[in-house]
Image: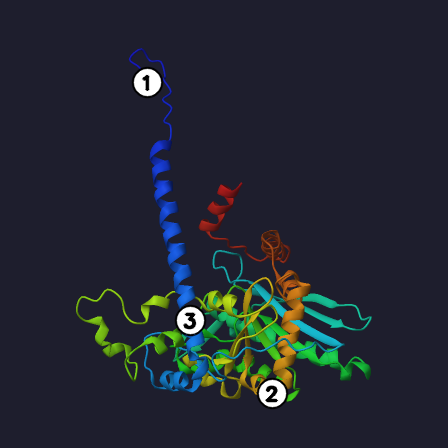
Amino acid sequence: MYTGTGHKTTIIVLLNLGAVKKQIDVMVQNRKALTNDYAERVERAVREWRRWASDPDALSDKIAKARTSWLVARPIEEITAVGSLPSRPGTLTVVATDGSQIFPDRNEVASCFLINLGYVSMTYGTCDRPEMGSEPELFFEDEDLYQDWSGHRAIITREQVGHRRMAMEFTRLVKLAEMSGDKDQRSKDIPIVAMSDGTLILWMLEGKPPALRREMLRGFLGSMDQLRKNRTPVCGYISSPGGSDVVNPLRVGMCPETPTVCDRCPWMTGERTELPCDPINGVTDAALYWRLLEPGERSALFESASKILDDYGPHSIVFFYVHTGQEIGRVEVPLWVAQDEDLLNLIHAAVIDQCRKGRGYPVVLSESHEQAVVKGTERELFYSMLRDAYVKNRMQVGVSVKQLKKKIVDV
């Protein structure tokens, strides 16, 4: 501000720390109350889980007849079953792929996108060195950039690029497993496990047009067919899962109605403040199994209720939880793996072994991610190379005004 004499006076405004301190105290008390409440909910969920140990068939029957407004996993073993850690084979090969991408950018010089696949193959119990690397692929043809659905032509979306990347990851995973088994005569006798980072359930395809679903699933399911033919077990590993697919069946078990039909819940009327299933609402499967499993153990097997799995055929996804010693992880496998005890035990043993080697997270997945990731500086270099190539070949370089302004601001 300026005084009447023309001199500038600086006013220093201080943060009202007293008011902030009062609000921090309120926040901490609220968080403490929520923590205590959550601990009580977890304890109740543990009691509910143990309650069905003597009559698991009754719970399975109640789940089968229920119609809920939330996803309820279907147990394909007794819900209270716990699997001990199988021994890992003396020699074992674990392969993994991961991918990252540079999405199409309409503000840049050319319409194109890049997918970079990282791959790793590690053999244990031999003197073989790990094999790892990355394979970038540039997509710029019209059939890559545009999609035709129901007579409408549109540029490929980020979501569709992600689906294409996943299909490529699994195509490469199949080749990696086949190459590992074909090195020499000795390698043919070494069991192979294929691992992927994240879910095997393409949730985001639910509700999409059938033609789009089929196209997006074609490459992925084709790779699953080949893995099944080669009898190579495959799994997806999810770190720090936040779902409640197993807690939700316990909520069904708490419902006094038979059958459970959420849309006609009589407890929703009147002045009731809590439903019979509310005491464990919000508890995650990870929190439940952290109390129930010992390091190395796995939970029962469950079948996901996701509707997209209707399109998976024999590759419908089954999952279980494992205690890695550091966290509860979710492991997803195709149904044909779950139905083969030897393959299932191989996956269980390999996941725990990988997590121990990776200090809580599968080391082969960490390495494949490091091979795949495209860093920010590499992305900028990619676009710089793209522009230079256009200039060198005397082609018009058209960068949008928006992009130019962003670069000016960055400078």
Quadrant position of residue 3: top left
**Foreground of the two, 251 or 119:** 251
**Dot 1 corresponds to which residue?**
2
Q: For mark 3, does the 10 Å Cα neighbourhood hold few (<14), some (14 to 19), or many (20 or more) residues? A: few
> Alpha-carbon distance for marks 1 and 2?
82 Å
**Dot 2 corresponds to which residue?**
340
* In the rendered image, the vertical position of residue 1 relative to residue 323, given as above or below: above
Residue 339 falls left or right of residue 253: right
Q: Which residue is most to the left? A: 270
Residue 171: percent from the left, percent from the top? 62, 77
Please report contact status of discs 1 and 2: CB closer than 8 Å, yes or no: no
> Depth-wise, is mark 1 or mark 2 nearer the camera?
2
Please report contact status of discs 2 and 3: CB closer than 8 Å, yes or no: no
Residue 44 falls left or right of residue 145: left
Amino acid carrying mark 3 in the image: Arg
**Dot 3 corresponds to which residue?**
47
Amino acid carrying mark 2 in the image: Asp
Please report contact status of discs 3 and 1: CB closer than 8 Å, yes or no: no
Q: Residue at x 36, y 27 (%)?
A: 13
Q: Which residue is most to the top? A: 5
Quadrant position of residue 277: bottom left
Q: Residue at x 66, y 86 (%)?
A: 230
Element class at badge 2: loop
* In the rendered image, the vertical position of residue 81 relative to residue 14, given as above or below: below
Quarter in which the N terminus is drawn: top left
Element class at badge 3: helix
Element class at badge 1: loop
**Foreground of the two, 146 or 262:** 262
Residue 301: percent from the left, percent from the top? 51, 80
Tally the numbered discs. Answer: 3
> Alpha-carbon distance for marks 3 and 1?
70 Å
Amino acid carrying mark 1 in the image: Tyr
